[in-house]
Amino acid sequence: MPDAADLKQLTDEITRLKQQRNAIILSHVYQPPEIQEIADLVGDSLELSRRAAATEASVIVFCGVHFMAESAAILSPQKTVLLPEVQAGCPMADTITAEALRAKKAELPGAQVVCYVNTSAEVKAECDIACTSANAVQVVASLPADRPVLFVPDKNLGRYVAKQSGRKMHIWDGCCHIHDRLTAGDVLKVKSLHPQALVLVHPECRPEVVELADHVASTTGMLRFAGEKPAGEYIVCTEKGILHQFNKQYPGKKFYPASDKLVCRDMQSTTLEKVLKALQTLEPQVTVAGEIRERALQCLERMLAV
C-alpha cells in the first residue's frame, strides 16, 4: 500500500489518464480498498460489464479477474478492455474447459447446460444459458421440466439451486476454493463471539455453512440486506474485500469476517501501479474471438431475458 503522498500522486495520474483515454474503471467488491476507491463503478462482475457497456467510454479497465474482463469484452466488442493484472484468474473457472464440457454433454444428450458466469468465454459458448449467484434459482426454474439440467462449474452453488428449486440436476465437481474452505466450525466460532450478529452467506459456500445463514445472497444482495435490516452486527461469509463496502456504506454497523482464510490472492493482486500502467500502455488487453463471442453472448442474453 503506497504512503499518502504516493497514493495521491498515483490517484491524480490515474484520473488524468482516465479522462484522456475516455476510460471507465470497474472494480469488483473483492478488490483491495484503494482500487475500489479509484473506480467509477464497484459491484458484481456481470452487472459491472452491463453498466460499462451502456456508457460512452472507449476503454474499460476491469479490476477483477480474467473471466470478468472477458464478459466485458463479450458485451462491448467495440471497446478496449484492459485487465491490469493479466495473471489474475479464477481457480473455479479453471475447473472446467470447453473440451471437458463437450465430453460431458455427449454423456447427457438433451441436457440443458446452465453455466455460472464465473466461467471462460469458451465454456459459455458451449452452454445454453448463464446465471449469476443472484438469479441462479430463477434461471433453473425457468427451464423446461422434461429435460435434464447440467449445472457448471460450482458444486456448492449447484446444490443450493437444486435445494431451492426442487430440481434434480447433474452438477459439475468444481468450487471456489476460497468459499469452500470456510467451515461451519469457523462460522460458529465467530458467532460465539458475536451472538447477536446476523450471518450473511454467499451460496458458493458449503451446504453446512449455508444452513447457518440468516440470509443467503450474492455480494450485492448481502450489501442490500445489511442496509435494509435494523440489525447492527453481521458475520460476513465471503471474500474479505467486500468489508470495505460494508464499512463505507454502513459506518454505524459492525461487520466481522467469518474467517481470516477468506482471501483471494487473484482478487487482491491488482494494484494502483498496475492500473496506471494499463492506462499508459493500453495493455494487457482482453479480447474474445468472433464466433466464441457470439455464442457466449447468446448464452448471456438468454439469461437476461428470463
Image (cartoon, helix red, strand yellow):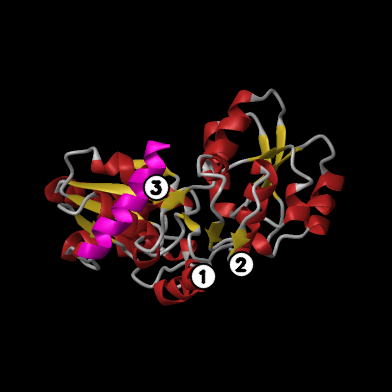
Quadrant that contains the C terminus: top left
Callout 1–callout 3 Cβ contact below 8 Å: no
Please rate how many residues cluster around mark 2, counting C-alpha atoms within 10 Å: few if below 14, some from 14 to 19, many from 20: some
Whether residue 202 is visible here, answered yes or no, is no
Please identify the dominant SS of the magenta region.
Answer: helix
Q: Secondary structure at mark 2?
A: helix
Tell me the CA gap for discs 2 and 3. Answer: 20 Å
Rendered image: mark on residue 46: 3
Q: Earlier in the sequence, mark 1 or mark 3?
A: 3
Residue named by callout 2: 177
The image shows residue 126 at horizontal and vertical percentages of 38, 64
Residue at 59% from the left image edge and 27% from the top image edge:
227
Q: Amino acid at mark 2?
A: His
The image shows residue 175 at horizontal and vertical percentages of 60, 65
Tell me the CA gap for discs 1 and 3. Answer: 18 Å
Quadrant that contains the N terminus: bottom left
Please rate how many residues cluster around mark 3, counting C-alpha atoms within 10 Å: few if below 14, some from 14 to 19, many from 20: many
Q: Secondary structure at mark 3?
A: helix
Residue at 45% from the left image edge and 46% from the top image edge:
44
Residue 303 magenta-highlighted = yes
- Give the mark count: 3
Residue at 61% from the left image edge and 61% from the top image edge:
170
Q: Earlier in the sequence, mark 1 or mark 2?
A: 1
Residue named by callout 1: 91
The image shows residue 34 at horizontal and vertical percentages of 43, 51
Q: Earlier in the sequence, mark 2 or mark 3?
A: 3
Q: Amino acid at mark 1?
A: Pro
Callout 2–callout 3 Cβ contact below 8 Å: no
Query: Start and end of the magenta stretch?
Result: 291-306
Q: Amino acid at mark 3?
A: Leu
Q: Is residue 304 above or below residue 111?
A: above
